[in-house]
Image (tube, rainbow, N blue to C red):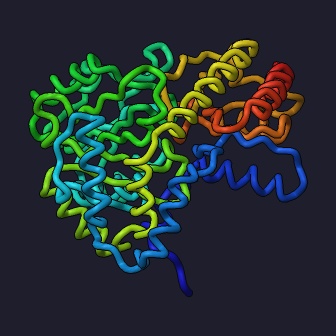
Amino acid sequence: MFSVSQRITEIIESETLAMTKRARELKEQGKDIISLSIGEPDFNTPQHICEAATKAMAEGYTHYPPVLGMLAFRESICRKLKHENGLDYQPKDIIVSNGAKHSIINAVLSMINPGDEVIIPAPFWVSYPSMVEYAGGKCVYVQAGVTQQYKFTAAQLEAVITPKTKLLIFSSPCNPSGAVFSRQELEAIAAVLARHPHLFVISDEIYEKINYAGKHVSIASLPGMKDRTAVVNGLAKGYAMTGWRIGYLAGPAWLVSACEKMQGLFTSGANSISQMAGIAALEGTQQPVESMRLEFLGRRDRMLALLAEIPGLLFDVPDGAFYIFPDVSHYLGKSAGELHIDTAENLCIYLLNEAGVACVGGTAFGMPSCIRISYATDIQSIEKAVARLKDAFAKLN
């Protein structure tokens, strides 16, 4: 009798991928479904980036790249980090991976031993806890709901630090809330970390380019933080390059070396052609990035205006990414006929079946009273979807 390993049975499937899969299956059955569940720009990759990939193939960049990444691309990343983030790195301080997710799991597996505590502020990206648990670590959660704009405070952080705490993982701009930490908020967090030198940070900055609040600030750029921070970023969100699978980590030499060893075991180097296209993305015109950001901003404002017409939803105005994360506590415990809505996940299933709109329940993000709604789709679909949601919510009593 054959069976899978225990580690496989303990991995929890991403709820965002699961809901996207359900929506796709219903579409394939011929049902009219609008998906507001997936975290992917609906734009195509800018043309000059695609042309750079074609050129790279013609010039023979089709062989195994180094595990750390191609030198020319790592040099480009260093220039980007210096120019945009005020961070001085050398190519040896960079490792290129198959997406930012790959960068994060490399770092977690390279640092966490069984029993180590990892602080994960909620709401959080769905994969953080599973990664930590896979490494044998213990997740320690800090709750930050809508009343505090989904942002954990320095005081909350300090309250949960123990001698066993090894790591803090957070994102800004945040998936799922769209919250963006200001320089002042990050300085307060850095001041706490200064009192706890045993605590390292993974700063997930994949949504950096989709920011409506002003200049992005990396916690690594603050005094004393660069040597104890892994800056994780990539090309997927800001450059509409999700399918190219390119992310990177910038950090201290000991961690990059460990990640190189880990990545060498599992995947080796990331796609060589995508890396050459990445140079064009980082060093070519940034106008497409700005155009997409402005389009997302317009969609955000339109969706916020429409959601405001649905009684009982509580939400903050997100300053980044392309999600709205309303608290739906008002509707939990209500019913539609014989159907009782007792969780946000049940609510999302109801909305999918009743309204043909796919959203994601908040439990997977550490907020059981919320749902995540993506506005990474066109205005017409947003208007149609929210109209359907409004009708479906109105049927609950």
Q: Position of residue 11 (x, y in %)?
A: 48, 59
Residue 141 makes an appearance in the image: yes
Left or right of 225? Residue 263 is right
The image quarter containing residue 297 is top right
Q: Position of residue 104 (x, y in %)?
A: 35, 52
Residue 346 makes an appearance in the image: no
Q: Quadrant of the C terminus?
A: top right
Label total for image: 0
The one nearer the camera, 116 or 240, is 240
The image quarter containing residue 61 is bottom left
Q: Quadrant of the N terminus?
A: bottom right
Left or right of 63? Residue 265 is left
Left or right of 183? Residue 91 is left
Which residue is painted at 25% across and 55% down in the image?
Answer: 75
The one nearer the camera, 246 or 371, is 246
Left or right of 214? Residue 295 is right
The one nearer the camera, 267 or 71, is 71
Which residue is painted at 78% across and 34% down in the image?
Answer: 381
Farthest-out residue, bottom: 1
* Position of 62 relative to 380 (above/below): below
* Position of 155 relative to 367 (above/below): above
Which residue is painted at 31% across and 40% down in the image?
Answer: 203
The one nearer the camera, 215 or 311, is 215
Which residue is painted at 25% across and 32% down in the image?
Answer: 219
* Position of 261 relative to 246 (above/below): below
* Position of 107 relative to 85 (above/below): below
Q: Position of residue 279 (x, y in %)?
A: 38, 55
The image quarter containing residue 216 is top left
Q: Position of residue 59 (x, y in %)?
A: 43, 75
